[in-house]
Amino acid sequence: MQIPNWPVSSERELELLREVLDSGRWGGHSDLVKKLEQAFAAFAHCKHAVSAMNGTVTLEMALSAAGVGAGDEVIVPAISFVSTAMAVSRVGATPVFVDIEPLSFNMDAERAAAAITKRTKAIIPVHFGAAIADMDRLLPLAAEHGLAVIEDAAHAQGSEWNGRRAGGLALAGSFSFQNSKVLTAGEGGMITTNDAAFAEHVWSIMDQGRKPGGGWFHHYLLGTNYRIGGFQAAVLLAQMERLPEQNARRTRNAALLRAELADVRGLQFQEIPKQQSANTWYLLLGRIDARRMGRTRDEFHRALTARGVPCTPFYPHPLYGNPLYQDGGCRVEPCPVSEECIGDAFWLPHRALLGDEETTRQIAGAMMKACQEVFA
Ligand SMILES: Cc1ncc(COP(=O)(O)O)c(C=O)c1O
């Protein structure tokens, strides 16, 4: 089975890297960093984009710029990568873990509503696997309570909700360009927003409290140095040129794979909301209900990987199960769905959706066989 490797690169990366080398401006003030921010803002259908070192500090910066700090609570889903909660803790606020919906894997708006207190300052919906969280319910809820919404769009470069791209649906969007992401320079991050003052604030945090266009030795607020360099920008600009075609290929292959396996009883793929007009397919997510046969998701995972298909048996625990949060520092709402998913969910990485049609049919065949083995 010819499942493509990830990440991919070509002469184009080398060409742009050479441009940075020859420019003599290798750091965060490279022209290519500016170009990248402009290109990404346009890509995300946003007015502003500010780059930073990774998709964890972008969340921290967005929270700080939204005025979130000590004594505040921020609602996050119990299922995500740890950064979604860790960023909240790093700014001195308390993450409040709420449950996800059973098949979208995204924050349950009703659970979020039930978790709001006088201390709540913000909500961070994660577009898990690139499926957009239910913004039709989360945005009005936040507006009603005066809460900032920061999209954790680390998985969702190019996903759309009713024609509007991830990162432009709320106050701010936070993106990651870490190695596994659909747009990558090994490490990197971006904040998108349509609010000019907010963009200036996060830019200033990222660049030592300077003002855009201001003097090098003039510092106006407590910032830090979270700049990316020209080399990362060069790689990301080259990767961006390939992204639309890759997103289209993943979309085609995901549709084929899901159609081939649509009738397998006990296998349910992630539910994609009807408002989602484009999907980046960072992860192909599903749940396995093999309990009636006395079998487990882990057996499915073993059967699939034995056939050469890369598969991850979900997270080992909801975020509050990490030792970091075992002794407090968070609030945990009831999360029965998250707990269930730990035992029965799985994902395939997006590179499994980047092959040709024949490879996709082979993956579907391997998944079918793994299901037959587990459900037999
Ligand atoms: C949902 C989510 N948010 C944030 C991050 C953090 O990104 P980074 O690794 O760039 O810090 C990740 C990374 O995997 C993620 O999956």
Image (cartoon, rainbow, N blue to C red):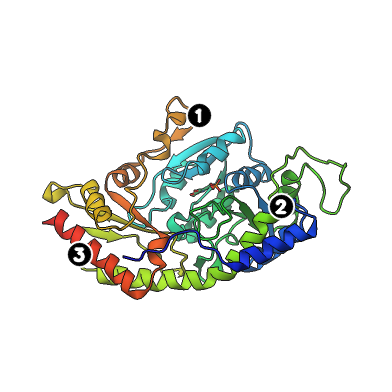
Q: Circle 2 is placed at which residue position?
A: 198
- Kindly report the distance in space between the C-alpha atoms of the residues bearing marks 2 and 3: 48 Å
Q: Residue 293, percent across and down?
A: 12, 50
In the rendered image, residue 224, in percent from the top left (x then y), is placed at: 73, 39
Q: Secondary structure at mark 1?
A: loop
Gap between marks 1 and 2 measured at Cα: 28 Å
Q: Residue at x 32, y 69 (%)?
A: 360
The structure residue drawn at horizontal position 42% and vertical position 27%, both measured from the top left corner, is 326
Which of pointers 2 and 3 lies earlier in the amino acid sequence?
A: 2
- The quarter of the picture where residue 327 lies is top left
Coordinates of residue 22 in the picture (x, y in percent):
77, 60
- Is the CB of mark 2 within 8 Å of ligand 1? no
Residue tagged by mark 1? 329
Closest to the observer, 154 or 36: 36
Question: If you read the primary sequence from the N terminus, does the residue marked by circle 1 or circle 3 appear first?
Answer: 3
Give the crowd class for mark 1: few <14, some 14-19, many >=20 residues within 10 Å.
Answer: some
Using residue 94 as the reference point, say whether residue 16 is left or right of it: right
SS under mark 2: helix
Compare residues 162 and 213 and report the one nearer the observer: 213
Report the residue at 76% width, 56% height from top. 30
Quadrant assignment for the C terminus: bottom left
Instruction: Kindly identify the residue that appears in the image at 51 percent across and 70 percent down.
Output: 162
Circle 3: is it few (<14), some (14-19), or many (20+) Cα within 10 Å?
few
Q: Which residue is denoted by mark 3 in the rendering?
A: 264
The answer to whether 324 appears left or right of 218 in the picture is left
Disc 2 vs disc 3: which is toward the camera? 3
User: Label 1 sits on what residue type?
Assistant: Gly
Indicate the amino acid at tag 3: Val
Task: Point out the image quarter for the N terminus.
Answer: bottom left
Is there a contact, CB below 8 Å, between mark 2 and mark 3?
no
361 or 275: which is nearer to us? 361
Q: Quadrant of residue 195?
A: bottom right
